[in-house]
Image (tube, rainbow, N blue to C red):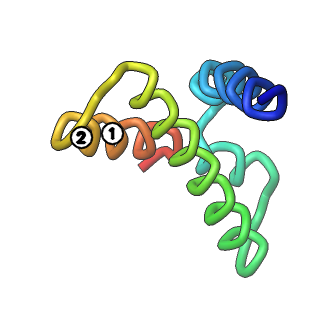
Amino acid sequence: MRMMTAIVCLTLCAAPALAAETSCKAQATDKKLAGAALKSFMTKCEKDAKTACETSAGEKKLAGAAKTSFTKKCVSDAVGT
C-alpha cells in the first residue's frame, strides 16, 4: 500500500513537471541528438509523456472518447508535434 501511495505521489509530481518542461523535440534539439540516439530519446520521452498524460486523465476522471482525445493532445503537446 505504501508503494502504491509513493507511486501515485511521484506521478502527481511528474505530470506538472512534464508540462513545465520544454517539448521532447526541443530537448532533443538542445542536446543535438541525431540518428539512433534521437530515435531512442524520442521513444522514451513519448512513452513517459503518455504515462503522465494517462495518469492526468485518470485524475480528471475522463473516460472513453474524452480520455482518448485528452491523452492524444497531451502527448502531442509534450512531444512537440
Q: Which residue is depicted at the point 41% across and 36% down?
A: 74
Cα–Cα gap, marks 1 and 2: 6 Å
Badge count: 2
Q: Nearer the viewer, mark 1 or mark 2?
A: 2
Residue wearing tag 2: 69
**Res. 60 image quadrant:** top left
Q: Which residue is depicted at the point 64% across and 48% down?
A: 48
**Res. 76 image quadrant:** top left
**Given the image, on which type of amino acid does mark 2 rest?**
Ser
Q: Which residue is depicted at the point 68% across and 27% down?
A: 8
User: What is the secondary structure assignment of the residue under circle 2?
Assistant: helix
Picture coordinates of residue 81 (x, y %)? 41, 50
**Given the image, on which type of amino acid does mark 1 rest?**
Lys
- In the image, residue 7 sits, relative to residue 64, either above or below, namely above
Verify CB contact (< 8 Å) between mark 1 and mark 2: yes
Instruction: Looking at the picture, tell me which residue is in the foreground, 69 or 39.
Output: 69
Instruction: Looking at the picture, tell me which residue is in the foreground, 31 or 61.
Output: 61
> Is 63 displayed left or right of 71 in the figure?
left
Instruction: Looking at the picture, tell me which residue is in the foreground, 37 or 2.
Output: 2
Question: Residue reaching furthest bottom?
Answer: 36
Picture coordinates of residue 24 (x, y %)? 62, 47
Q: What is the number of the mark on residue 73?
A: 1
> Is 25 displayed left or right of 50 in the figure?
right
